[in-house]
Image (cartoon, coloured by chain):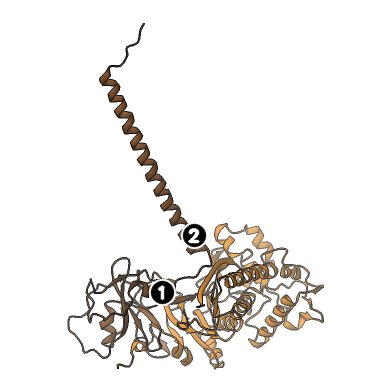
Chain colours: A orange, B brown
């Protein structure tokens, strides 16, 4: 029986999720898609910082005391802390209180539909006497102070909170792709963070990269197979906080939304959490440092778009991508004549 | 006081009127029922397409339904290229094309201009530069607005929708004015 393409769309983790699966058995495909949807919802219930009863929220409330975490939470916290070391602290899961101080205290869906909280609430979140741009940052917190013990034990220092947003979503999408990929070619798209396994029978998965300036056009198309792609962008999840523009990418060095001349960073890697973190780190570092950082990672393909619209990419990206702004786009259509 | 009985002619008028009303009502009922069935069927189809994890049509199926054999492409597409089939591309980008600049150096590219209006179906230049190569056009289709679009196979075997008037441009080695769109496009990485 020939393989067919099955699709499921739903909302989870504050974003639109799409699952694609090629399979020859309709019932099995539907069961698998339903299972993965449940997996998303269960993972969100466990790892969301916006849900007061989630395991992550309980860990954060219990800062200062030992906490017995599930293997999922423990694995992710450990991974996030490892990445914190590997990126020199630029990727930092301990920026929760800075995010809260900048008003990102509800899911973005709710932030868009409900007015911001009162000035008093905001003031209560920051330290007295500090300007808002230097919002409270757990300055004393270091990776060394978070204790990871045996049998899933985690102890956060008092006053510290974790936000696993990006890494948790990337991990969930990657896991979902892996589970679906055990049945057939699969692609999982969680709000633009994408992981795929295999390729459909009629060619690779074609994925585009949105132009962060217009969000309507695409700056590149990429044929993907067994790869993941993530884009970190200042153009999305923006809001005004006390009259100042804010976004969700906190620079741990300042405790404020990153002031960077990179509008968006796109990275392709073999695993989505890696792509997600590399992209975020490059964006926070800014053009000069971000480029230098990415050039130390030859296994990646990447595209940086500066605030003034310039596109910079490495050879690997250019080789793989159909980038209309590069001079090789039309060349792709040259086929040998018989 | 005794009421007047209606005259015979009045009675027949009333009878005729009643018959007409009856007939109209019957026709109306039948029409409404049929229309209702039609609407329900359409709603069902829309729901099935939108919500059910049912197989989405692959481009191969869509194309074979339109034209069983690949067709020879007209060298310069006119507003009514022949043969033309009506296919709704999976992405509306073809219907609302957004031209992108192509150029710049490898590694550092110039910023892309914003979208402009859709190009006309006539080639951009009256002077005809030499054709450098021929596109592998699998089929000609049309947008809902009637604009010709070529389904082109590239040198990696990937199918693209190429705006009709861009076909001669690309064959002359020029950049397309409208961003070609992959026929089998899936995700879109856009920052999350």
For label 2, the residue is B47
Task: Specify the quadrant that holds the N terminus of chain B.
Answer: top left
Q: Dots 2 and 1: beta carbons under 8 Å?
A: no
Note whether residue A131 is visible: no
Question: Which chain contains the residue that carries disc 2?
Answer: B
B181 or B151, nearer to the observer: B151
* Quarter occupied by residue A332: bottom left
Residue A95: image location, x then y, percent: 66, 74
How far apart marks 2 and 1 lie (CA) works out to: 21 Å
Q: Residue furthest top?
A: B1
Residue A236 horizontal side relative to residue A335, left or right? right
Residue at image position (25%, 83%) is B168
Residue B143: image location, x then y, percent: 32, 69
Residue B61 is tagged as: 1
Residue B93: image location, x then y, percent: 38, 71
Note whether residue A88 is visible: yes
A174 or A258, nearer to the observer: A174
Q: Between tags 2 and 1, which lies in front? A: 1
């Amino acid at each position: 029986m020939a393989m067919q393409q099955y699709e499921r769309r739903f909302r989870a983790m504050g974003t639109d999720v799409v699952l694609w699966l090629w399979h020859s058995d309709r019932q099995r495909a539907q069961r698998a898609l339903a299972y993965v949807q449940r997996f998303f919802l269960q993972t969100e219930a466990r790892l969301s910082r916006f849900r007061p009863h989630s395991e992550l929220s309980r860990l954060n409330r219990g800062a200062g005391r030992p906490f017995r975490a599930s293997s999922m939470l423990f694995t992710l916290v450990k991974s996030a802390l490892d990445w914190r070391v590997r990126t020199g602290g630029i990727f930092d899961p301990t920026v929760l209180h800075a995010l809260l101080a900048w008003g990102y205290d509800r899911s973005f869906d709710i932030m868009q539909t409900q007015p911001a909280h009162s000035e008093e609430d905001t003031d209560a979140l920051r330290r007295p006497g500090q300007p808002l741009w230097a919002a409270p940052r757990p300055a004393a917190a270091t990776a060394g102070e978070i204790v990871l013990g045996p049998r899933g034990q985690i102890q956060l220092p008092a006053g510290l909170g974790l936000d696993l947003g990006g890494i948790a979503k990337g991990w969930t999408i990657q896991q979902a792709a892996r589970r679906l990929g055990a049945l057939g070619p699969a692609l999982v798209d969680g709000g633009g963070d994408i992981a795929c396994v295999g390729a459909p029978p009629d060619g690779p998965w074609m994925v585009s990269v949105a132009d962060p300036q217009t969000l309507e056009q695409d700056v590149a198309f990429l044929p993907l197979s067994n790869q993941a792609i993530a884009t970190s962008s200042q153009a999305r999840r923006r809001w005004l906080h006390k009259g100042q523009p804010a976004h969700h990418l906190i620079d741990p060095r300042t405790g404020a939304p990153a002031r960077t001349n990179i509008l968006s960073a796109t990275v392709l890697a073999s695993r989505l959490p890696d792509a997600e973190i590399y992209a975020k780190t490059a964006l926070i570092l800014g053009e000069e440092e971000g480029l230098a950082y990415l050039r130390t990672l030859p296994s990646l393909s990447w595209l940086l778009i500066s605030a003034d619209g310039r596109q910079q990419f490495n050879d690997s990206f250019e080789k793989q991508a159909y980038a209309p702004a590069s001079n090789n786009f039309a060349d792709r259509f040259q086929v040998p004549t018989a | 006081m005794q009421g007047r009985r209606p005259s015979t002619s009045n009675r027949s008028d009333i009878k005729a009127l009643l018959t007409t009303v009856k007939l109209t009502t019957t026709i109306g009922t039948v029409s409404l029922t049929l229309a209702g069935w039609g609407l329900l069927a359409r709603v069902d189809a829309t729901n099935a397409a939108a919500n059910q994890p049912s197989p989405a049509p692959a481009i191969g199926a869509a194309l074979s339904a339109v034209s069983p054999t690949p067709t020879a492409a007209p060298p310069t597409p006119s507003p009514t290229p022949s043969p033309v089939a009506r296919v709704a591309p999976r992405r509306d980008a073809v219907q609302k094309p957004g031209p992108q600049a192509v150029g710049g150096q490898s590694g550092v590219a110039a910023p892309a201009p914003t979208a402009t209006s859709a190009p006309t179906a006539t080639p951009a230049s009256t002077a005809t530069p030499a054709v450098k190569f021929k596109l592998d056009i699998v089929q000609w289709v049309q947008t809902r607005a009637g604009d010709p679009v070529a389904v082109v196979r590239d040198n990696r075997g990937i199918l693209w929708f190429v705006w009709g008037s861009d076909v001669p441009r690309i064959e002359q080695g020029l950049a397309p004015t409208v961003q070609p769109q992959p026929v089998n496009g899936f995700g879109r990485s856009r920052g999350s």
